Image (cartoon, rainbow, N blue to C red):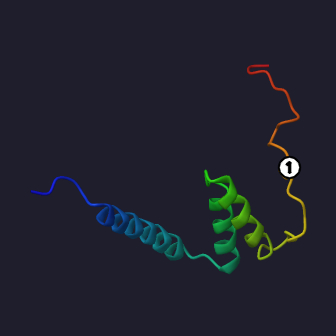
Amino acid sequence: MKIGKTESEKDIKNIQESREIVKTIIDYGVNEEHKVNILYFLSLELENRSALEDITKILKKYRSGIKPDEESQYDDKEPDGDNRKLLGV
């Protein structure tokens, strides 16, 4: 008797869901520039810092208005690392 799903079945379901999301985006009517920007912004949501840096570096050279050798505002420092903020003030 089988209880639950196998890892392969979970992977297949995950891939199917991902493809459905892509289809929805394509059906929305996006151009090539939109696709690259969507890939870029999704890559910024990655938890794996190394993957985030590698993917955004590659995508920068394909984004209009972004130069591949342009330094990121986040290179070598944490976002808002220089600013001290008080909540509610």
Compared across the picture, whether 45 is left or right of 68 comes to left
Q: Which SS class for mark 1?
A: loop
The residue sitting at 61% across, 75% down in the picture is 30
In the picture of the structure, the residue carrying the numbered disc 1 is 76
The residue sitting at 80% across, 42% down in the picture is 78
Q: If the image is split into quadrants, where does the N terminus sit?
A: bottom left
Relative vertical location of residue 85 with respect to residue 10 in this rendering, above or below? above
Relative vertical location of residue 28 with respect to residue 1 in this rendering, above or below? below
**51 and 42: which is toward the camera:** 51
The residue sitting at 35% across, 69% down in the picture is 12
Image coordinates of residue 33 in percent, x first then y, are 71, 76
Relative vertical location of residue 19 with respect to residue 72 in this rendering, above or below? below
Q: Amino acid at mark 1?
A: Asp
Using the rendered view, name the quadrant where residue 66 is placed: bottom right
Compared across the picture, whether 49 is left or right of 21 comes to right
Image coordinates of residue 6 in percent, x first then y, are 27, 60
The residue sitting at 77% across, 76% down in the picture is 62
